[in-house]
Image: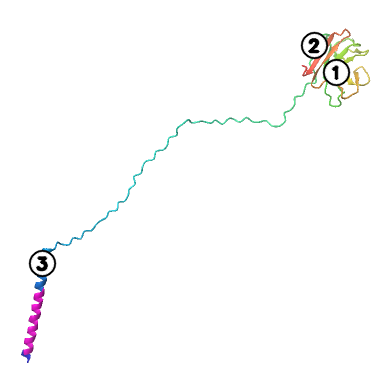
Amino acid sequence: MRRASSNHASLLLKTLLACLLGAGVFLIARASYLSNNYFPLIIVQEITETATPSFTPTPSATPTPTGTITITTTPTRTPTVTGTLPTATQTRTPTPTRTLVPGVFIVEIEYAPETHRLDEYVEIRNQTGEFIPMEGWTLRDENQNVFTFPQFSLDPWAEIKVWTKAGILDPRNLYWGRTDPTDPVWNDHGDCAYLRDTEHDLMHSVCYGSKR
């Protein structure tokens, strides 16, 4: 009984070995066939190269200014004077322009009095040591306004004022006799005074303002 089992196992083992051997031969034969009839598989990998753009900096030219260069010069400012400039005051004391009789001349004309318009006067001086009889002498302006001296003598080294207004005569004051304040004798803008003797000879004259 043991001998039959042993034979049976041996037979199975041989059969298994034969199958394995046949399978090995078959695999070897197939491999040989494939190696003779097929080219080896070559895997081609396509490499796509992505070009990276490169930028070459282009030098930029700095524009050169052309044309005419204008140089503007700022003018020096001249200070501006503002306000009211003082008005020049006319000299009240006239300068004798001519003396025909030495020692008797006009020394002042008050033509713009501050108190009253008729407070004008002409001052005459005797610069000698003698009495000067002046009766009949005349004092006249540019507008033919004439004052005639009354009976009167001018003392040596003395002065007398001939007023435009009315008043009482005395050794130092004579009066024209005008009473209308709108009718003065001496013009404010300019006038001349003429002193003449009884022969109508010009003794002295003085001009002021625009009449100079």
> Which residue type does callout 1 highlight?
Val
| The furthest residue to the bottom | 1
> Which residue type does callout 2 highlight?
Arg
| Pointer 3 local density, CA inside 10 Å: few below 14, some 14–19, many at least 20 | few
Q: Is residue 57 left or right of residue 166?
A: left
Image mark for residue 122 = 1
| The furthest residue to the front | 37
| Mark 1 vs mark 2, CA separation in Å | 16 Å
Q: Give the range drawn in magenta.
A: 4-23
- Dot 1 falls on a residue whose secondary structure is strand
Does the segment drawn in magenta span residue 113?
no
Between 89 and 26, the one nearer to me in the picture: 26
Q: Point out residue 91 in the picture as x, y percentages from the top left corner.
A: 78, 21
Identify the mark nearer the N-term, 1 or 2: 2
Asked if labels 1 and 3 touch by Cβ distance under 8 angstroms, the answer is: no
How many labels, in total?
3
Instruction: Kindly identify the residue that appears in the image at 12 percent across and 64 percent down.
Output: 35
Between 20 and 112, the one nearer to me in the picture: 20
Does 56 sit above or below residue 205? below
Tag 2 residue: 98
Image mark for residue 33 = 3
Q: Point out residue 46 in the picture as x, y percentages from the top left corner.
A: 24, 57
Does the segment drawn in magenta span residue 21?
yes
> Which residue type does callout 3 highlight?
Tyr
